Image: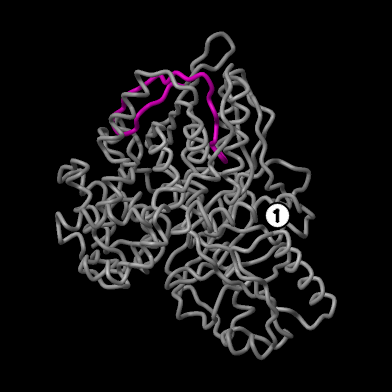
Amino acid sequence: MPSSQLGPRERVAALQRMADERFDVLVIGGGVTGCGTALDAASRGLSVALVEQRDFASGTSSRSSKLFHGGLRYLEQFEFGLVREAARERKLMVDTLCPHLARPVSFAIPLEKSRWQRFYLSAGTLLYDWIGGRRSLPRRRRLSLADLQRRYPGLRTTHYSGAIEYFDAQMDDARHTLTLARTAARSGACLASSVRQTDFLKQGSRVIGARVQCLESGREIEVQARQVILATGVWTDRVQSQVGGGDLRVRASKGVHLVVPRDRIDIDGGLVLRTATSVLFVIPWKQHWIIGTTDTDWNLDLAHPAASRRDVDYLLEVVNQALVHPLVHDDIQGVYAGLRPLLYGESDATSQLSREHAVSEPAAGLLTIAGGKYTTYRVMARDAVDAVARHLGREIPASCTERVPLVGAEGWHAAWNSRVAAARKAGLSLASFEHLLLRYGSAIDELLEAMAEDPLLGEPLEGAPEYLRVEIHQAVTREAALHLDDVLTRRTRISVETFDRGLAAARPAAAIMAHPLGWSAEDLEREIVHYEARVQAERESQGQPDDHTADAARMGAPDVRTGPSQRARGAKVVPLPR
C-alpha cells in the first residue's frame, strides 16, 4: 500500500511522477473539495494527481466555523434535502470516517417570551433532529429559564423564557482537510502543494492537462491527464477564464471570526444568537471561544481576505447585546477571515445564496465543481468523479468513500480506551497524550516514534506550551508543511490562539523545521521575518475602517510563496521592531 506520508522527499517524488506519467484525473485545488475528490477518484482505482498553489486548506477550508453541521438555518429556506444530506454526512464523520477529529458540541438557542417564537424554534429543532435520522449525537432538549441561568450565568436572560439545546459536531477544518490529503496519498494519489497552475494543455479544443510551476524551485511541469477537475472555490471564475469562462459563476462571501479566551464568557456551551439578517454563533474551541460570523460580499484579494475594524466591531456589538460582561478589543486573541464560494443566485444578500453545489463542463476534458458547504464535501467529490467517469471510456467503480476511514481513524476507539497506560509508557502527561490523540488519532504512533528517537520533541513548544515540539516535526516530515505560516496557522492554530499571534513561538518552531526542510540560517530568518510581517499586516488591517483600506493594509505583507525569482530579487519584507 502506498504511504500516507507527505514529507519533503515525497513531494519531490510526486513532482517527478507528474512530469513522467499521464493520469486519469488531475485535480486543481487542495481545499476540502479538491482533497476529497482526489480521495474519491483514487479509491475507485483511478490514477490521480493534485496540485495546490499555496498550502493544503490555505483558503476557505481552514477558515470556517469548524463544524460538521446539518445546517439548521437552511430549514428556514426550506432546503430540506440539503439539511438531510448534511446530517447524513455529519453522522458518517462522527461514527466512521474521522471519529478522532469530530466530536459533539452543544448549542443553546435562547427563547424569547413570544409564544410564536417558542413554537417556531421548538418545531424547527425537532424537525432538525428528525431529519438527522439515526442518532450519532444527543437529542435536542428544552432548557427552562432556571436551567439557562444556571448553565449560562454570563448570558443576559431578561428577555428570555428558556432555551432549546441541540447538538452538532465540531472539528478542526484544516486538520481534517490535511488528513483527507494524507488518506488520498495512501490510496495512491500524487499530491503537491505550492504548485501553481499557469495554463491548460490542449489538443485542439480539448483540455488534456495543465502547465504548472513549483513555487519553491521554479520548475515548470506539463501534467498530462485524461480529465481535469477544477476544485478551486472562489478562484473558479478566474481559472475558468483561461478556457473562455464557464456556466458556473461563483460569488465570494466574507466570513470573519473572533477568538477569545474561554474565561471571558461564563457559559456552559455554545450559543446561537439571532441577528437582523442571519445568526451569530459562539462556539466552544478548546480553551477559547470562536465568535462568528459575518456574511458580506468580497471583491478584493482572494488569497488573503482581510477583516476590518467594522467587521470586528460588528461581531463585538452583536455578541455583547447578549452578555452580562461585554467583551472589549483587548479580549481578542485572534481574528480570521475566510471566503465562502457561493453559486450566483437571484438574491442580492449573500446569506440567501445557495449552498448547493453543481458540476459543469466549461470545456471538453475539463470539469468544474463549485458551491456546496464543508460538511458535504464528500458528496461533492463523488458527484465530480461520477461526471469524470462518464468521459473516461471505461467502467469505473462506484464511490466507496463512505467506507474509507481517514488516516488516524482505524483503531481510534481502542487507542482512546488505553490512553492512560499508553501515556504513562510514553512519558507524557495524560492531558498531553489526549491532546495528541484528539488531533492525530491512531496515527499518534508516528509522533511517539519521533519522540523515542529525539526525547526533546516531547517537550512543550516555547511560546505555545499547549502544543508539543513533536507536532512541528510531524507537520514537516509527514504533513506537507513547507513554510512557518503553514505550521503556525494550519497544522496548529497558534496564530489565533495566542495574544501575540504566534510571534513568541515563531523562532522555536522555525528551528525545528529547519533541518528536515534543509533550511540555511538565511532561510530560517526569512521565514520568521515573513511571518512577523504577516502578523503586523493583519493587525493593521483589523484597525482599518472598511474592506478597501483593510485589504490594502493586509497586502503590505508579501506572500511567502512568491516564487524563487521574486525571493532572489529580494521581495521587500519589513521586520517588526524588537
The answer to whether residue 89 is above or below residue 217 is below
Front residue of 522/239: it is 239
Q: Is residue 222 toward the left or the right of residue 504 in the image?
A: right
On-image quarter of the C terminus: bottom left
- In the picture of the structure, the residue carrying the numbered disc 1 is 83
The answer to whether residue 155 is above or below residue 416 is below
Q: Secondary structure at mark 1?
A: helix
Image color mode: one colour
Residue 414 image position (x, y, % from top left): 38, 62
Front residue of 518/440: it is 440
Front residue of 227/546: it is 227
Residue 183 image position (x, y, % from top left): 42, 42
Residue 257 image position (x, y, % from top left): 53, 62
Q: Residues within 10 Å of mark 1 (few under 14, many from 20)?
A: many
Residue 423 image position (x, y, % from top left): 27, 68
Residue type for callout 1: Val
Is residue 575 shown to the viewer in this render?
Answer: yes
Please report the residue visible at 76 percent of the width from the left and 71 percent of the height from the top: 121
Q: Is residue 82 toward the left or the right of residue 105 in the image?
A: right
Please report the residue visible at 31 percent of the width from the left and 57 percent of the height from the top: 444
Q: Is residue 317 toward the left or the right of residue 80 in the image?
A: left
In the image, which residues are magenta? 210-234
Q: Is residue 402 toward the left or the right of residue 330 in the image?
A: right
Front residue of 536/231: it is 231
Which quadrant of the view contains residue 532?
A: bottom left
Q: Is residue 315 magenta?
A: no
Please report the residue visible at 70 percent of the width from the left and 53 percent of the height from the top: 84
Please report the residue visible at 37 percent of the width from the left and 34 percent of the height from the top: 192
Q: Is residue 230 magenta?
A: yes
Which quadrant of the view contains residue 69?
A: bottom right
